[in-house]
Image (spheres, helix red, strand yellow):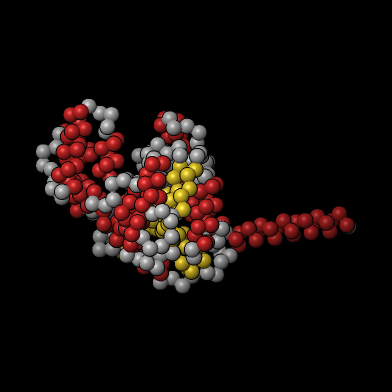
Amino acid sequence: MKRISFALITLFSFYSLICHAQMALPNEEDVTLTTKEGSINGKLLIPNSEKSCPVVILIAGSGPTDMDGNSPVIKGKNNSLKYLAEGLAGYGIASLRFDKRGIASSAAAGKEESKLVFEDYVNDVIAWIDYLARDQRFSGISVAGHSEGSLIGMLACQSRPKVKGFVSLAGAGRPAYEILEEQVSSQPDMIKKEVASINASLRAGRQVGDISAYMQALFRPSVQPYLISWYKYNPQEVIASLKMPVLIIQGEKDIQVSVNDAELLKKARPDAELLLINTMNHVLKDCDTMDMQKQMVTYGDPALPVNAKLMSTLTTFVKGHR
């Protein structure tokens, strides 16, 4: 009889633990931002255990990267932003992540390439900030932009002083044209001079009509309005203008954005907190190599979590500025 009673108590305790764990799971809500071009869709992850909590807007990087941090041009999924959202929820912090206009579930909100400008993405984030500001469940809003999303987030925060904190995750510290010219620095002089010449025109706001066939991917006429709008911004100047606390996080194993970029941002904003993570790469995962081919495995491996130091520092920052 005692053995039976003990077994029942153990079973009841186990059942209670399972029920508690299920109750503690975050609540995921589908959310939509209505624009004149179409709907921009996202997911709001809210900790069930919190009546009022801070919320973080997670902004994806360049290209067709979706709200989870994945891209159709890369085999497999890294789920970096999805894991960030889930990690934040575990610390009692809500998050909003979304598919950019024209991408994945927000494809209907896409614009013709020739009409898309950098400010479209910035204005979308501003609209998301206003959307969350109307929700009484949140004690404060922070913005975290990854890669190209860093500059987008900075610009959005300029006009929204109620944002409690800004986080740059692997964000560039130099204008886009400067990075592009660095990327072709190992190419023949003819290519380097052509890129510099095209960039000079675009920086002055002038489109270039005669583009070589081998330059079409970078400078095709339909993408030039976007480049002109993007080239206007120097991340160092933008981050220096922000009125809220700033956290800069950069992985030292990042093969896309350098530690120098993070240091330039820090120099422009001396009171910002700077975290360099020795083992972290561009998709926020741990790796031990700078070899591109070996690193690409981490870009498509959903079994790898995001870096633990990143997670703990981000949550501390957000809770400290709620």
Q: Quadrant of the N terminus?
A: bottom right
* Relative image position of residue 27 (x, y in whole percent): 52, 62
User: In the displayed structure, would residue 44 be above or below residue 285?
Assistant: below
Q: State how many labels appear.
A: 0
Q: Residue at x 27, y 42 (%)?
A: 178
Q: Single out the residue that lies furthest toward the right.
A: 1
* Relative image position of residue 42 (x, y in whole percent): 40, 58
Q: Residue at x 52, y 41 (%)?
A: 303
Q: Quadrant of residue 4?
A: bottom right
Left or right: residue 187 versus residue 25 is: left
Q: Residue at x 41, y 41 (%)?
A: 259
* Relative image position of residue 251 (x, y in whole percent): 45, 42
Q: Nearer the viewer, residue 255 or 41?
A: 255
Q: Residue at x 60, y 62 (%)?
A: 23
- Let me know if residue 25 appears in the view: yes
* Relative image position of residue 3 (x, y in whole percent): 86, 54
- Let me know if residue 106 appears in the view: no
Left or right: residue 257 versus residue 111 is: right
